[in-house]
Image: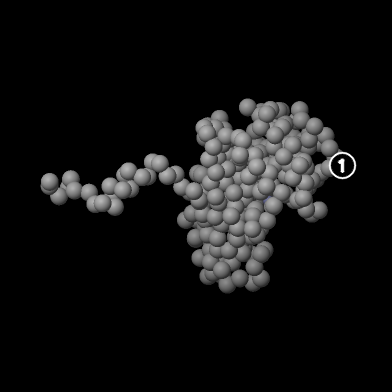
Amino acid sequence: MSAPERISRREALALIWFPFFPARHIALAGARYRILRNGHSRRRYLLIHGDEASARSVLAGYMQTHDGIAYLAENHTREVVVEGLKIDPNRWFSRVGAEASLRKLNAGPDPAQVQRALAAIDRGRERLVRAFTPPRGGVLVALHNNSSSYSVEAEAPISDRTSLKEPDNPHAFFLCTDPKDFAVLAASPYNVVLQQKAPPSDDGSLSRLAAARGFRYVNLEVRLGHPERQREMLWWLDWNLK
Ligand SMILES: [Zn+2]
């Protein structure tokens, strides 16, 4: 056998095993997401904030009986650490958003440390975004839990369209980026806002990125501690959204 034909044992094993073992995790800095795959579907699901326990239990339960790929944060904190600095993992989808989050969550950070953190995020961002981006015709559904400080009332003024069927329950709502999805979700008994055009201030969140890149994205927000309501809305979405 001539030298170029010879492959190492390691390479041979890689060739044999690689197709059967898709990655079980994807990570960026201190954030690690467990990947759950079921059947063949263009649906993608995400729990990005590790401390949102109701959303975690709803999504984990949902994936036992539904097809798609789900990404679940393995950390149990809202913030994650990069180069020794805290950051909100739903603010690092743009460099400007990441820098603002680093400055907000860390008191007087060392400028060089901030630059190292931003460089680390820059290196890993696109890989994470590619994983979270649904294939053509698919949709990414991100589950969140909120508290008293955030509700649809913060999003309505910066949205393109709104349908507020439950004004007395502003913490439960859908936020979507596709007008067709808005039309479907607006027929639900729930609150929904459309943010098709990214608002001028880029906060680095995944919804802004989805609007900028033009992929279908739905945020499902429910107040922490109300898994039954979040389950009901996720099931409604699954049944009605094509
Ligand atoms: Zn969240």
For the point 71% across and 28% down, which residue is it?
183
The answer to whether residue 228 is above or below residue 79 is: above
Distance from mark 1 CB to nearest ligand 1 atom below 8 Å: no
x then y, percent, for residue 151: 78, 47
Q: How many marks?
A: 1
Quick one: which residue is furthest to the right in this view?
168
Residue at image location 76% in from the left, 30% down from the top: 188
Specify the quadrant that holds the C terminus: top right
Residue 188 visible: yes
Q: Which residue is mark 1?
A: 168
Residue 81, horizontal then vertical, whole percent: 58, 63
Element on which disc 1 rests:
loop
Q: Determine whether 8 is above or below 210 in the image.
A: below
Q: Quadrant for residue 193, please give it.
A: top right
Residue 33 pos. (x, y %): 55, 51
Quadrant housing residue 44: top right
Does residue 206 show up?
A: no
Q: Position of residue 190 (x, y in %)?
A: 78, 35
What is the basis of the colouring in this image?
one colour
Residue in the foreground of this view, choosing between 200 and 165: 165
> Which amino acid, by three-letter code, is at mark 1?
Asp
Mark 1, residues whose alpha carbon is within 10 Å: few (<14), some, or many (≥20)?
few
Is 108 drawn above or below residue 15 in the view shown? below
Q: Residue at x 52, y 49 (%)?
A: 128
Seen as rendered, the residue at the extreme left is 2
Q: Nearer the viewer, residue 119 or 52?
A: 52
> Which residue occupies 52% across, 56% down?
28
